[in-house]
Image: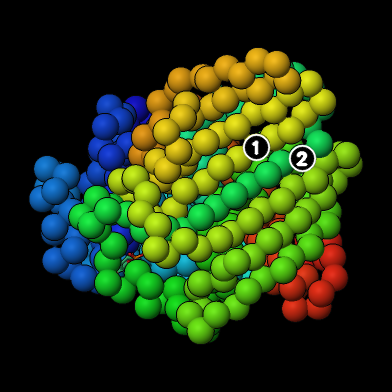
């Protein structure tokens, strides 16, 4: 195989960020788009300047022998069935996070992955965002010594009128339905924060959370979550706050992140991710008396494009892509453990979730 023929399934909000990396890849042809809303798939084809087959039913994609791989960008509750269906149809599968809404569903996916001869991974753009990748390189090179604390701040604010991504009107309908969604933004967006911290440091064995529930199912601010990394003398704090009257710079979602990894010899800051709130270098190394800014590409789109490139390259090289089913299970367990901790007001070992 020297080219991957890809179908993009789900042409809603996030397809605007997921598609460019595939469209730019010289060894990838986007041969099909699928969405029950035909006009949405047709609009994307026009925006991306391609003439793919347009399908309104997923089964048609699975029946199409000219499709080698699928990128699933559908509402989360549909992921398990669609992943299993595609693996059984002999397609390579990349699926947007979160992998599913329950651990039981991941077990079903894991069984299908074990039977399959094709690749499976979850699309996690944070693991390909250059400032986060740079922080991982610095950590692994021992630049800040032994890490003991990871601080993750997320603030949801507002973007200047007209400056953000076009969000489809139904994107929040399924998210706000407790029957379809495992939690609010602490699960949907918090998944990224657990995935990043676990990629940097390792697995989690204890989660403790204070979660504010509001009239809006997805708005869970202010909230604060702490966890301990298994086998490490290292903790994490993850804060989620709302600043609904504060306007920030940004081109995508009205959210801004700030990460700090404190080590025995210094600290690393990642000062921007989704938004562009702080006018600072994207990575800063703090060594007590010295502060050094590190410039790397910092457009949020970079993480999505890197993730797309990685999937195609791994298929062509016959290698397992990052964010396999086991890592995805552990991230989901941690993200779900926070709710149980808040409900029961006690620390929870995410590994106990089945
Ligand atoms: N990585 C990130 O930063 C990020 C950001 C947003 C969303 N996501 C994830 O991406 C997924 C989609 O989120 P979204 O915000 O784009 O949602 P959305 O509602 O905007 O888009 C979903 C699209 O899927 C289509 N769809 C529904 N059922 C389908 C089916 N059976 N077959 C094909 N298409 C179908 C819908 O018509 C819609 O166009 C979710 O899992 C979400 O968690 C990730």
Name the residue rendered at 77%, 29% in the picture.
263
Q: Which mark is residue 155?
A: none
Nearest to N terminus: mark 2 or mark 1: 2
Q: Quadrant of ligand 1?
A: bottom left
Name the residue rendered at 83%, 54% in the picture.
205
Is residue 288 rendered to the left or right of residue 186?
right
Q: How many C-alpha atoms fall within 10 Å of the one at disc 2: few (<14), some, or many (≥20)? A: many
Is residue 260 rendered to the left or right of residue 81?
right
Q: Nearer the viewer, residue 60 or 277?
A: 277
Whether residue 284 is visible to the viewer of this picture, yes or no, is: yes
Q: Give the image location of residue 211, x and y in percent.
A: 67, 71
SS assignment at label 1:
strand
Q: Which residue is mark 1?
A: 260
Q: Is residue 118 above or below residue 74?
A: above
Q: Which residue is mark 2?
A: 149
Q: Is residue 94 above or below residue 304?
A: below
Q: Quadrant of residue 312?
A: top left
């Amino acid at each position: 195989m020297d080219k991957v023929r890809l179908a993009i399934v789900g042409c809603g909000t996030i397809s605007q960020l997921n598609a460019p990396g595939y469209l730019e890849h010289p060894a990838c042809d986007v041969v099909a788009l699928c969405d029950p809303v035909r006009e949405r798939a047709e609009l994307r084809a026009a925006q991306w300047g391609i003439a793919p087959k347009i399908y309104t039913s997923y089964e048609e994609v699975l029946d199409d022998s000219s499709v080698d791989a699928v990128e699933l960008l559908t509402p989360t509750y549909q992921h398990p069935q669609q992943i299993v269906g595609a693996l059984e149809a002999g397609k390579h599968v990349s699926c947007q996070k979160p992998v599913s809404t329950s651990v039981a569903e991941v077990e079903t996916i894991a069984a299908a992955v074990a039977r399959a001869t094709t690749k499976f991974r979850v699309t996690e753009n944070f693991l390909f965002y250059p400032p986060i990748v740079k922080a991982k390189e610095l950590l692994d090179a021992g630049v800040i010594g032994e890490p003991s604390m990871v601080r993750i701040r997320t603030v949801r604010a507002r973007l200047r009128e007209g400056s953000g991504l076009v969000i489809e009107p139904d994107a929040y309908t399924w998210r706000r339905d407790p029957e379809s969604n495992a939690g609010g933004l602490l699960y949907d967006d918090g998944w990224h924060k657990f995935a990043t911290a676990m990629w940097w440091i390792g697995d989690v064995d204890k989660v403790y959370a204070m979660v504010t529930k509001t009239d809006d199912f997805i708005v869970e601010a202010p909230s604060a979550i702490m966890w301990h990394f298994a086998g490490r003398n290292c903790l994490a704090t993850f804060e989620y706050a709302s600043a609904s009257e504060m306007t920030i710079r940004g081109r995508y979602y009205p959210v801004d992140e700030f990460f700090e990894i404190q080590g025995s010899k210094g600290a690393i800051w990642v000062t921007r991710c989704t938004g562009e709130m702080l006018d600072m270098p994207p990575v800063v190394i703090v060594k007590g008396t010295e502060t050094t800014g590190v410039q790397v590409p910092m457009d949020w789109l970079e993480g999505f494009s890197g993730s797309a490139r990685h999937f195609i390259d791994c298929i062509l090289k016959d290698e397992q892509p990052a964010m396999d089913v086991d890592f995805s299970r552990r991230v989901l367990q941690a993200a779900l453990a926070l709710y149980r901790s808040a409900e029961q007001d006690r620390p929870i070992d995410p590994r106990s979730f089945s």
